[in-house]
Image (cartoon, rainbow, N blue to C red):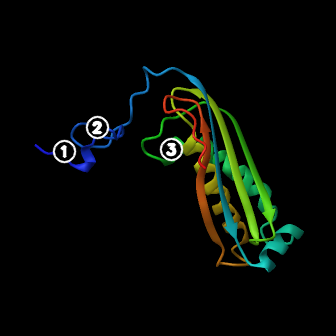
Amino acid sequence: MQESPRQSSSLSHLNAQGEAQMVDVSAKQSTHRQALAGGQIRMSKATFEAIEAGNTPKGDVLGTAKLAAIMAAKQTANLIPLCHPLPLHKIEVAIAPDAELPGYQIHATVITKAETGVEMEALTAVSIAALTLYDMAKALEKSMQIEAIRLISKTGGKSGDYFPD
């Protein structure tokens, strides 16, 4: 019998029947793991200037987005079906103005000591920060664009470190 692409043994989230499963990490060593994710939100110059001036209808746009990102990272296992709940030891979110976009560059670093990595937590934090920025400023502009959400780096674990070119 030919194996379908869904049933590939290299996909750890699929069982022998090709069904989704949570990976058993109980035999893995608990190690220090860190992930850094990034993304951006692009907007009009007028919206960017209003946020920078603190002149928005909903209040503290950047502070709210940063808090939302931290809260989201802690809820990743509740949002992504096959993610393991992890003890997160540090979540750091940076939202930096970028007048060239115009808009904001978003970065999230997540650290744990666990049996599996925190890439999804870092990506979730960036995604929710961007969505919250959109929500907080949508009264000013609905055409904002969330872009380039990606894993920038990760350290620790069996698969080793990841630092793309």
Q: Residue furthest right?
A: 53
Q: Residue 9's mark?
A: 2
- N-term-proximal mark, 1 vs 2: 1
Query: Which residue is painted at 71% across and 77% down in the image?
Result: 139
Disc 3 and disc 1: Cα gap in Å? 31 Å
SS label for mark 1? loop
Q: Quadrant of residue 32?
A: top right
Q: Residue furthest front?
A: 165
Residue 100 appears in the picture as rendered: yes
Q: Nearer the viewer, residue 45 or 79?
A: 45
Residues marked 1 and 2 touching at CB (< 8 Å):
yes
Determine which residue is flagged by label 3.
Answer: 78
Query: Which residue is painted at 71% across and 56% down in the image?
Result: 106
Task: Specify the quadrant that holds the N terminus.
Answer: top left
Disc 2 and disc 3: Cα gap in Å? 26 Å
Determine which residue is flagged by label 1.
Answer: 3
* Residue 165 left/right relative to 55: left
SS label for mark 2? loop
Q: Amino acid at mark 3?
A: Asn
Where residue 124 sits in the image (x, y, percent)? 58, 50
- Image depth: mark 2 or mark 3 in front: 2
Q: Amino acid at mark 1?
A: Glu
42 to 65, vertically: above or below:
below
Q: Few, some or many C-alpha atoms within 10 Å of disc 1 (few <14, some 14-19, many ≥20)?
A: few
- N-term-proximal mark, 2 vs 3: 2
Q: Nearer the viewer, residue 72 or 5?
A: 5
* Residue 132 left/right relative to 119: right
Q: Residue furthest left?
A: 1
- N-term-proximal mark, 3 vs 1: 1
Residue 56 appears in the picture as rendered: no
Where residue 67 sits in the image (x, y, percent)? 73, 50
